Amino acid sequence: MASGTLLYAQSGGVTAVINATASGVIAEARARKIKVLAARNGILGALREDLIDTSKESAAAIRGLAHTPGGAFGSCRYKLKSLEADRARYERLLEVLRAHDVRWFLYNGGNDSADTAHKVSQLAAEFDYPLTCIGVPKTIDNDLAVTDCCPGFGSAAKYTAVSVREAALDVAAMAETSTRVFVYEAMGRHAGWLAAAAGLAGEGPDDAPHLILFPERPYDEADFLARVRKVVDRVGYCVVVASEGIQTADGRFVADAGGGKDSFGHTQLGGVASYLAGRVKDELGLKVHWTLPDYLQRSARHIASKTDLDQAVAVGKAAVRLALAGRNATMPVIRRTSDKPYRWKIDSAPLAQVANHEKKMPAGFLRRDGYGITAAARRYLEPLIRGEAYPPYRNGIPAYVTLKNLPVKKKLPAWQG
């Protein structure tokens, strides 16, 4: 039996299936007699030595994580800078790892988390500390390099496509005497994967969504408004899906909320649907409604994709296997081996190929006019939302689990960072 402890942490915006990955990690480690600690609220918990003993959780509770959304151990948006700029924090992190005999560190997150795991592996090597660091993929934005898709995306994509289809039926029913234009805002800062998924809601030219706005294409207001008018004249109503990250030709975010920044240093977005609705009302004089699903699109476990769930569990189990095999600075990734029938497998890639790289929508996935998806995009997206994985229900609502999250006794002075 390998000696040492495995530390798992969640980072960034959580998803409908990130806890399924945690379930896979813990179940795989338990099967191999490895003790698993979890950092409370991501890397902050590691720095504060605020660690959770997962061995105190029952097997049923760990299985229940697979159908529970959110982040069971807490997450954070906290980005460590370079090894030089944040030296004290990295050294504190290494001190905590030493104190608890952590030999395997699994960081479950997106691009910034892959970067952090990579830097921690470099620091451990510098201090000759035997530590294997594994990045575990997660993001509804689907923008991680190398991997075919990202756990979390398929379920958010399914929620988006279903919501747009259902809302479109509502608008169609009321269009003659009420709402003529409906605007749905999808997450996606620089990559329009989630907005593209809305395209699965319809198939014909008159099916909603009629217009999709992508970050990969500059927003041209005059052209957009003219197209809305044409769709309304032809169909009777218009459903628009806009990515939160759409930009003007000069690179300005349409939904830049006053220039604020989040904890990762990214521009704080939100409000593009409201803006577009206002322009439609003012310029076209049409009654318009808009929606900002926000956290709903990433937390909707009740309508999760079975494909996404299976992949989320698989990367968790694979991460443990890679860690125990000593595959340092590595991430398990999903490889698509066939479209029809859809088949996939878990492979691995160096963190250096993932960190600080961003996968945008291929040009061939965007319709020539820039307002919809192509058949190639549909072939890619459709398998990712397939299958239902409903949680158990009790008294009409999902029966999600809550862990005890009992802390491990601290061994070091409190962190003053």
Image (cartoon, helix red, strand yellow):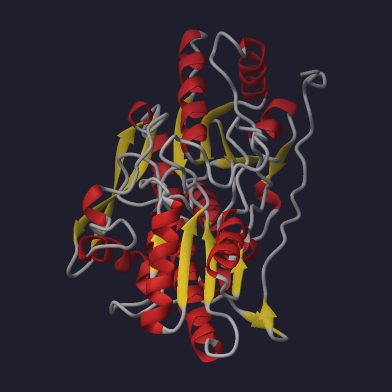
Q: Nearer the viewer, residue 381 or 170?
A: 170
Q: Can residue 213 be seen in this view?
A: no
Q: In this view, does 147 lie above or below 104?
A: below
Q: In this view, does 174 lie to the left or right of 111?
A: right
| Residue 399 position within the rendered picture, expressed as x and y whole percent measured from the top left | 67, 75
Q: Position of 62 compared to 380: left or right?
A: right
Image x and y of residue 320, in percent: 44, 42
Residue 161 vs residue 139, the one in the foreground: 161
In the image, what residue occupies the spot 57% across and 40% down?
8
Number of marks in picture:
0
Residue 195 image point, x, y percent: 43, 59
Image-quadrant location for residue 249: top left
**Residue at (36% x, 42% y) in the render:** 332
User: x%, y% of residue 169?
Assistant: 49, 86
- Left or right, 414 with respect to 68, comes to right
Q: Which of 18 and 6 is in front in this view?
A: 18
Q: Quadrant of the C terminus?
A: top right
Residue 408 position (above or below residue 255): above
Q: In this view, does 415 lie above or below 194?
A: above
> Which quadrant of the figure has residue 371?
bottom left
Tell me if I can see residue 212 in this picture. yes
